Amino acid sequence: MTDFDMLVIGSGPGGQKAAIAAAKLGRRVAVVDRREMVGGVSLHTGTVPSKTLREAVLYLTGLTQRDLYGQSYRLKDDITIADLTARTQHVVGREMDVVRNQLSRNRVALFPGTGRFVDDHTVAVTDADGQEQLLTARHIVIATGTRPARPASVEFDERTIMDSDSVLNMERVPRSMVIVGAGVIGIEYASMFAALGSKVTVVEQREGMLDFCDVEIVEALKYRLRDLAVTFRFGETVAAVERHARGALAILESGKKIPADAVMYSAGRQGLTDGLDLDKAGLTADRRGRIAVDEHYRTAVPHIYAVGDVIGFPALAATSMEQGRSAAYHACEEPVNPIHHLQPIGIYSIPEISFIGRTEDQLTDEKVPFEVGVSRYRELARGQIVGDAHGMLKLLVSPEDRKLLGVHCFGTSATELIHIGQAVMGCGGTVDYLVDAVFNYPTFAESYKVAALDATNKMREVDHLRD
């Protein structure tokens, strides 16, 4: 007889949903996590604080209102880190209460501390005082998440040279900043600090950024960021960072030297598995600390599952939640549909990017014919009302069966707007549904109708030429 039917190591989005799903199915469930980290990395240093910080930046800088009230418009002239973190701390505190309440309400036992395997059914939990307790479980779910990867050659001091975790603890808004890496996290922080007035330089060893996104959308974002005085150094590598009394000096392999108040590394993520003693459970992790799983999120040991960022791509809070639920259902022998292959991607840059489905380049490479329908925010009443003249929505439509092949959005509320396209694509709908649908006016959602009409008008022209 084991102590629990399911033991979850980690209380982030994946672990939390796995625990609650199993509890809803009547199983005895426990979660292990440090007391101060309930809610996981996502809640404390990742998704929630970074997106809250973005909201505070947009509000206090008045950036999105400048088309209406002039380029000098600001809600607050001297924005401090305290101004920004006040909102972050409030939201994180509230969300921690929500997570604790959900676990408690579903009778999930919470063991504060860190877990490590003793064998494939037993986990030793060490609390803050060093006291150890052994817990046994029929099924175990690893949901420990990730931490920022740190190059061994760089001396991080959390003040001048930092990663995406420690950037949240800065003492003041830097006048200048070098961001190493133009991935999602790097670009999100680059746009936030640029909006605050920092002179930002982004250094990326690849020749471009966000290469999984639509090219036109990425170009639009680059244009907007350059407008905020962001400098891009593509095809460049940081050879060394020197720390000085008044800041840092980033030295590139090409010989360029970039002085800055702060340097932030955004060099990918490392799975938090090194303290788990995986070998005692018969498991291994790759060099990035990630654990391999099958389509049911089972590891090499069938009764041990792994979900969330610790298993690698796509490493999103939204997908982690579904992985947790799926793993719990499978462990409890409850029927569960596989996660839908259509998953939206959201990038919380300023402005936002979101998309679902394939890009123009992918369709071209696959020799799939498509027509493009575009709606620009400046043509929508809602765009004029909120002051966003730069946003756009793009539909990629099959001229053969008129189904949507991809939806790409850039601008205010892009991450919300994408779900209309997701619903239409997921239900096998056609562009004609969007043409005939009535949308509230004035809304950004109306952009679907405008883009759908644009695409169908182009397809009609081709048909007329053939007649």
Image (cartoon, helix red, strand yellow):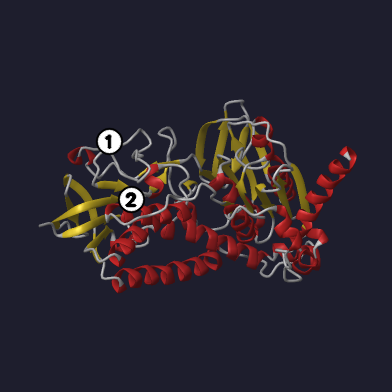
Q: In this rendered view, identify the residue nearer to me: 375 or 100.
A: 375
Quarter of the rendering occupied by the N terminus? bottom left
Q: Quadrant of residue 173?
A: bottom right
The residue under label 2 is which amino acid type?
Answer: Thr
Q: Residues within 10 Å of mark 1 (few under 14, many from 20)?
A: some
Q: Nearer the viewer, residue 459 or 234?
A: 459
Report x, y in % for residue 234. 64, 33
The dot on residue 284 is 1
> What secondary structure is found at the residue carrying circle 2?
loop
* SS at circle 1: loop
Query: Where is the C terminus found, in terms of image quarters?
Result: top right
**Picture coordinates of residue 363 (x, y %)?**
66, 36
Judge whether residue 70 can be spotted in this image.
no
In terms of sequence position, does the residue under pointer 1 or pointer 2 come before the other?
2
Q: At which x and y percent is residue 289? A: 35, 39
Residue 144, disc = 2
Q: Position of residue 178 (x, y in %)?
A: 58, 43
Q: Is residue 43 above or below residue 262?
A: below
- Give above or below for 250 relative to 353: above
Residue in the image at 25% along x and 46% along y: 304
Residue sitting at 60 percent across and 39 percent down?
Answer: 212
Farthest residue to the left: give it.
1
Residue at the location (81% across, 52% down)? Answer: 454
Q: Nearer the viewer, residue 358 or 226?
A: 358
- Cα separation, mark 1 vs mark 2, equals 14 Å
Depth check, front residue: 449 or 193? 449
Q: Residue at x 69, y 56 (%)?
A: 411
User: Is residue 382 toward the left or the right of residue 84 in the image?
Assistant: right
**Is 388 situated above or below 362?**
below
Report crowding for label 2: few under 14, some 14 to 19, many 20 or more residues within 10 A (C-alpha): many
Q: Amino acid at mark 1?
A: Thr
Give the left or right position of residue 67, taking residue 28 as reference: right
